[in-house]
Image (cartoon, coloured by chain):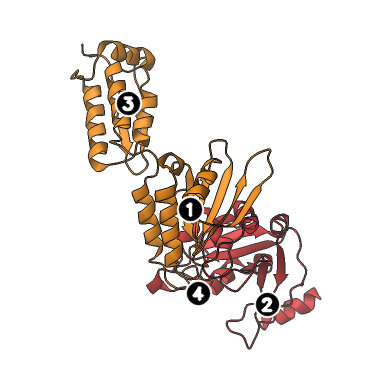
Amino acid sequence: MKVLSNIFSKFGFYFLPKTFGESEKIVRGVFSPMNINPKTNKLKANMFKPPIGSDEISVNRLSFTTPEYCKISNKKSENLDNNRIFYGLALLLVEEILESKVNIVYSPIRWPKSPSNPFHADIKLGFYAEKGKPLPGEYQLVINKLTSKARFYKDTNPGTDNWDGDLII
Amino acid sequence: MVISDFSLQEYKIIPENYQIRRDRLLNSQNSNWLKLGKSSNFDDDSEILHDFKKSLDYFHASNHRIKFVHALHELNETISENLDSYLEECISNQQFSIGIDKRVITKQILSFKALNNNWDGYGAIPLELDSAANAIMLLTNFFSESALRFIDELYPNPQGTISVIFNNSTNGTISIEIGNDFMSYYVEEKGKQTLFFNEITINLKEARFIESFI
């Protein structure tokens, strides 16, 4: 299976297992200074809150790819005019996600959807966010706990396609 | 009386951090401080006290916060009674604000309104006007000044609401999310069951109840 996987990957086809190992690394791109405490470089909980109409928090399976791929993939969401700039990556291990009482599912983005991302996954909060409505206290606690476990890796050169941050461990 | 052989390394006052970084005291610091405390008064033209007064005046003029004053107070326990009284007078006259003040909170909340659609790269919407108004009302009208000192974080959320996190005096956490029509929050304290309060009306009575946990 691994041999086939390696062959197919050379042509842009990736076969990742649907299940997750506990020590698998999961990353989420950070785009806004509103997601980081500038004094401590700690992540804020709004980093892991879903958008309206969703209970999903979009992430990448770093263990199967590279920080460069994650950076390039995330930079497609950049908008310099709106001060939306790639700052770095927030890292969690699968076991930390599961400990926080949320789930994670493998949800690759494949053709014809664009841009494709075979390493995409979603952390499922289990509660759908609504416009102008606060999350219930129970879900605020879950997300705050999740956030406290996450590590922020800053990219010191966000303008390039190379990962210019610390080694993600 | 001037302490001629006393040499105090530079006090570096960093307004942005509201810290005093004391480098190094020479010549058995404690005894020198004690000498200074016993023998000088605030009107003394000793260089050190003169510098302190200049710094205080600077912070007063620029309306920086009282963390500087508290730090100064702590460092100078043995300094003259007159300087101590001066500091107390400043605090009681509120010439320096304590902790986070209402103006700062209001400015911060208003700054969130500048966020555009998709500000977080994942579909976040701009701050809702009603959520902003409710947050300003709750924090600046209903909470007391002393409660505001315990604010640890204040930030916008992807669905247009605002979160405020308090860390209370016993290291407990109160996490409030303020929306267009109501707020929801939890209170987490060591050794106690976490309490959850959802869809709570934003008013003075509820604010006082939350304050009882701070």
Q: Identify the hue of chain A.
A: red
The answer as to whether the residues below labels 4 and 2 share one chain is yes
Nearer mark to the viewer, of 4 and 3: 3
Q: Residue at x 75, y 77 (%)?
A: A5
Name the image quarter holding residue A46. Answer: bottom right
Name the image quarter holding residue B117. Answer: bottom left
Question: Dot 3 corresponds to which residue?
Answer: B88
Name the image quarter holding residue A134. Answer: bottom right
The answer as to whether the residues below labels 2 and 3 share one chain is no
Going by the numbered disc 3, the residue's amino acid type is Glu
Nearer mark to the viewer, of 1 and 2: 1
Which chain does orange denote in the image? B
Sequence order check, earlier mark of 3 and 1: 3
Sequence order check, earlier mark of 4 and 2: 4
At which x and y percent is residue B163?
Answer: 51, 56
The answer to which of A100 and B161 lies nearer the viewer is: B161
> CA–CA distance between discs 2 and 3?
63 Å
The answer as to whether the residues below labels 1 and 2 share one chain is no
Question: Dot 2 corresponds to which residue?
Answer: A108
Going by the numbered disc 2, the residue's amino acid type is Pro
Pointer 1 chain: B
Pointer 2 chain: A
Pointer 3 chain: B
